[in-house]
Amino acid sequence: MSSQFLPVTSQFIPVALSSSQFIPLCTLLFVLALRGPLWLPALLYGLWLLADRDTPRRGGRPCAWVRAWPVWKHFRDYFPISLIRTTPLDPGRNYIFGFHPHGVLAAGAFGNFCTEATGFGLLFPGLRPHLLTLPCWFRLPLFRDYAMAGGLVSSEPSSLEHLLAGEGGGRVAVIALGGPPESLEAQPGALRLQLLTPLVPVFSFGENEGNFGVPKGEFWGSQMGAPLELPRVPNPSGSQVELWHRRYRESLERLFEEHKEGFGVPPERHLSFV
């Protein structure tokens, strides 16, 4: 397995047909179909869901057409946002992108890695991003297929293992680290991160501000850093985990400090970790 951890920064954009709107709609349509003249196709679809239940943890089913929908460009231009490549990545390797901060919606991760609005495919040819999210979303009819079309996959351990074990490289697992504890602390100006795992750095300038109002467009953008190389250690000791966790944090801090003023963060502001 050829895998690599990558520090990245990302950016908030609004999500069309977000889960808060799309999930109830999909559920309602499926229930209405079951109770109406379309009950047979709905029943067959339900049976197919059982047969297809492993797909979200086997790389999903990304669709280039969905990722390229013109509507995503409208969201990009509304703020506007950008994705800046500072280091080319070898498409013959697999990567993990760590995304910070989680924010309320992790919408920056969605915009940059589940759509082509910011040109991920052009900037990193040969790489296929997959954003990991909660397994529960893939139990919902219709919504699961919409989610997988953009590149969302289950966050189960077996899902991550499947992505990183892919032969030939080119797979990217994007993990929004920090989880619910960090999302609860999302507020304008917040720079405190929850690092509960020895994974990889990605910082999202504007993620917390964007969840609480209209952001200042000139301060928004995505800056991608250089990869952080990690060795393959099947059974790491506590000291080894702590070593790479510290190096990951240092890489994230360095990336943040190098680019913060370009995104409107005052020089005296720094990241803090809990």
Image (spheres, rainbow, N blue to C red):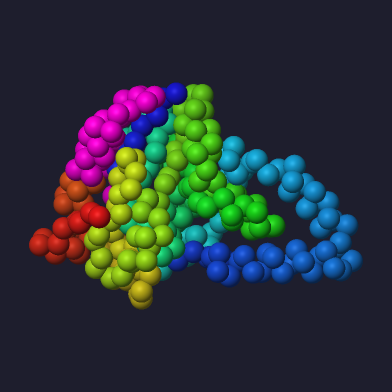
- Residue at the farthest front position: 238
Q: Position of residue 101 (x, y in %)?
A: 33, 57
The reply to whether residue 247 is in sight is yes
Q: Quadrant of the N terminus?
A: top left
Task: Give the residue at x 85% y 68%.
Answer: 35
* Between 135 and 43, the one nearer to me in the picture: 135
Asked whether residue 227 is drawn in magenta, I would say yes
The range drawn in magenta is: 221-250
Image position of 76 with respect to 253: above or below: below
Q: Quadrant of the C terminus?
A: bottom left
Give whichever of 139, 145 is nearer the camera.
Answer: 139
Q: Quadrant of residue 244?
A: top left
The structure residue drawn at horizontal position 50% and vertical position 39%, both measured from the top left corner, is: 157
Q: Position of residue 140 (x, y in %)?
A: 66, 57
Horizontal side of residue 269 vs 92, given as left or right: left
What residue do we see at 52% from left, 43% from top? 156
Total marks in image: 0
| Residue 10 seen in the current view | no
Q: What's the residue at 21%, 40% (across, down)?
A: 246
15 magenta-colored: no
Residue 161, horizontal then vertical, whole percent? 49, 33
Is 220 positioned to the left or the right of 110 in the image? left
Q: Residue furthest left?
A: 268
Residue 122 sits above or below residue 46 on the image: above
